[in-house]
Amino acid sequence: MSELDLAEFRAEMERERTWRETELRQLRNQVSLLPSEDQRKTARKALVVMLYAHFEGVSKALLSMYVKRINNSGLRVDEVVPPIGAASLAEVFSALRDPNTKCKVFGKQLPDDTALHRFARDREFVEVAWKIAERSVQIDADKVVDAESNLKPVVLKKILFRLGLDPDLAKPWEGTIHCLLNHRNTVAHGTARFGLDAKLFEELERAVWSVVGEIVKAVFDAAAGKAYLTSKAQRLAGGAATGPAGEG
């Protein structure tokens, strides 16, 4: 990845963050125009929901950009670290585990012979296994970067793990994410009767965007350091790995 390409990658991430910050700021300004503090407190409940929506949205977008960069790099499975290789081979492993895939030879004669059909799937896998290393790396971002409709810290850690990044990157962010989720959930479940005061929301918003900034940095550093490549591929590319993903 050239310096120019890296600069554009960083700019793309910043654009994604900026439009969301701008939209939330515009909504916050509208709330500030309400005539009474009680009305403003009530309106901030909606701001909390929007803040969470943007946090989940920007997190998914940033991590999906990383996946897109990998997909567009023209890499083979034997050039990437195991987590990226495994993510790229999701279809292969899914077919291997699918109990509905029957042995073509005995499918009609022995339709319920579970052990036989499992062996047949294993056999088919071995027949093509030698070609796997040469397969082009293509990851389904929607499956790998899955927020599960509730981007809790553990869910974010799972995404980082699947991308070969250190799940512990999310440890310092846990308190902020839990706080955001708690406020979002009280609003969504109809229990936030009295709304939020300005100071509480401002502190929460500031903390959330700080986390987003850390995600931007983590993704950029991984892309710049080619954390998705094996050590061998790193050496051939003339770069140094920065991620903890392991190697092939």
Image: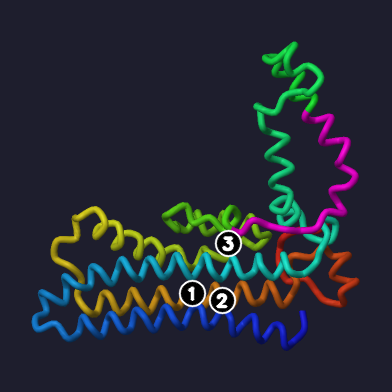
Kindly report which numbered mark, 3 or 2, lies closer to the viewer in this rendering.
Answer: 2
**What residue do we see at 56% from left, 71% from top?**
62
Q: Is residue 124 on the magenta stretch?
A: yes
Q: Quadrant of the C terminus?
A: bottom right
Frontmost residue, 243 versus 29:
29
Q: Characterize the local packing of mark 3: few (<14), some (14-19) or many (20 or more) Cα atoms within 10 angstroms.
A: few
User: Residue 139 sits in which quadrant?
Assistant: bottom right
* Cα–Cα gap, marks 2 and 1: 6 Å
User: Residue 23 sits in which quadrant?
Assistant: bottom left
Q: Residue 216: which disc?
A: 2
* Cα–Cα gap, marks 3 and 2: 16 Å
Label 2: state its secondary structure: helix
Q: Mark 1: which amino acid?
A: Val
- Asked whether the beta carbons under mark 3 and mark 2 sit within 8 Å of each other, the answer is no
Q: Characterize the local packing of mark 1: few (<14), some (14-19) or many (20 or more) Cα atoms within 10 angstroms.
A: many
Please identify the residue farthest to the top as the structure is shown. 109
Residue identifier under label 3: 168
**What residue do we see at 25% from left, 68% from top?**
46
Task: Locate residue 75, reporting x and y percent.
Answer: 81, 64
Q: Characterize the local packing of mark 2: few (<14), some (14-19) or many (20 or more) Cα atoms within 10 angstroms.
A: some
Range shown magenta: 121-141
**What residue do we see at 24% from left, 79% from top?**
199
User: Residue 26 sits in which quadrant?
Assistant: bottom left
Please state if 40 lies on the left or on the right of 233 as rendered. Answer: left
